[in-house]
Amino acid sequence: MAWPRPVYDGDRLVAFVRGFFGVRFDPDDPADRPRSGLWRPAVSAGHQGREYGRLAVEAVCEEVRRRGGSRVAVSWKPGGHGPEGFHAGLDFRPTGETSGDQVVAGLDLGPALAV
């Protein structure tokens, strides 16, 4: 299930993020647990470094907690110009897993909220 959220500054679209909830990264693996997290967050080039990305990620984290979750996942293709530094700056840590050719990282949110 995708949970798309555009981010505006006034009437200008500056970022976009999608959340997902209860998704298995490898549905063929019965040991793969359902996860919630971020799906390709993006901030337009002219608006990076202005907190829009952080705010978008925080909105997904709040929704994960609202739904009873306590951990957020994200994945990306490794490379010199990718989002690894952005996610690391928000305390996402690689889990040692991969999803296809992507690095998987997670962020603990603490105990889930009572719903």
Image: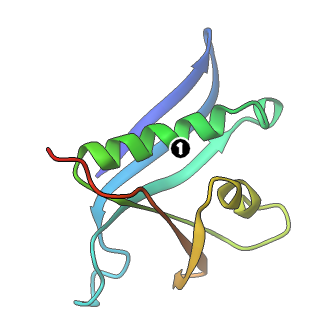
Residue 62 horizontal side relative to residue 6, left or right: left
x then y, percent, for residue 52: 65, 32
Residue 43 horizontal side relative to residue 39, left or right: right
Residue designated by label 1: 57
| Image vertical order of residue 84 relative to residue 8, above or below | below
Q: Residue at x 63, y 44 (%)?
A: 42
Instruction: Give residue 101's quadrant in the image.
Output: bottom right
Residue 8 horizontal side relative to residue 37, left or right: right
Q: Residues within 10 Å of mark 1 (few under 14, many from 20)?
A: many
x then y, percent, for residue 15: 62, 33
Q: Residue at x 31, y 73 (%)?
A: 24
**In the structure shown, which secondary structural element does the residue marked by tag 1 occupy?**
helix
x then y, percent, for residue 32: 30, 84
Q: Residue at x 45, y 45 (%)?
A: 18
Q: Nearer the viewer, residue 11 or 107?
A: 107
x then y, percent, for residue 65: 31, 48
Q: Residue furthest top?
A: 10
| Image vertical order of residue 100 relative to residue 74, above or below | below
Q: How many marks?
A: 1
Q: Residue furthest front?
A: 111
Q: Amino acid at mark 1?
A: Val
| Image vertical order of residue 90 relative to residue 84, above or below | above
Q: Pick the quarter of the image with the C terminus.
A: top left
Q: How is the image coloured?
A: rainbow
Q: Residue furthest right?
A: 80
Q: Residue at x 43, y 43 (%)?
A: 60
Instruction: Give residue 62's quadrant in the image.
Output: top left
Instruction: Give residue 35's quadrant in the image.
Output: bottom left
